[in-house]
Amino acid sequence: MMISKLVKIREPDWKLIEAANGEEALKKADELDIDYFSVDLSMPGMDGYEVIRQIKSRQPLSRIVLMTANIQSNVLKQAADLGAACVHKPVTEESIDKMLEYFHA
């Protein structure tokens, strides 16, 4: 909810879609053409890496940010290997700005 709130302030014309877990996110990815994804590393059911893999197979041109409090170099590398940027939690104005900067690049 905090991500949506901060993104809406910066991008009021964007339509935001939320999912409770990875499976729901993948279902929405199948139904909709989504430009940008914010994915949490730790989610119920499947982790963020698997969600990213599956999103990339469905919508290869989408830009994805992996949001995580885990700042280990292997997390950054795995996200990059999957074609996603990594933005560190907590969710703050600064972290949302980094996410949006990646989306707009």
Image (tube, rainbow, N blue to C red):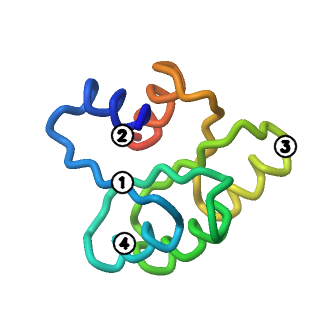
Q: Position of residue 19 (x, y in %)?
A: 41, 59
Asked whether the residues under the numbered discs 1 and 2 touch, taking CB atoms below 8 Å apart as contact, a structural biologist would say no
On residue 73, which mark appears? 3
> Which of pointers 3 and 2 lies earlier in the amino acid sequence?
3
Nearest the viewer among 61 and 7 is 7
Q: Give neighbour class at mark 3: few <14, some 14-19, many 20+ (Cα, 10 Å).
A: few
The reply to whether the C-beta atoms of the residues labelled 4 and 3 are less than 8 Å apart is no
The kind of residue on which mark 4 rests is Ala
Q: Residue at x 62, y 58 (%)?
A: 43
Amino acid carrying mark 2 in the image: His
Q: Which mark is residue 18?
A: 1
**Would you name the residue on which mark 2 appears?**
104
Estimate the spatial distance between the alpha carbons at disc 1 and disc 2, rounded to whole Å: 20 Å
User: Quadrant of the rendered structure where residue 2 is?
Assistant: top left
Q: Callout 4: 10 Å neighbours few (<14), some, many (20+)?
A: some
Quadrant the N terminus occupies: top left
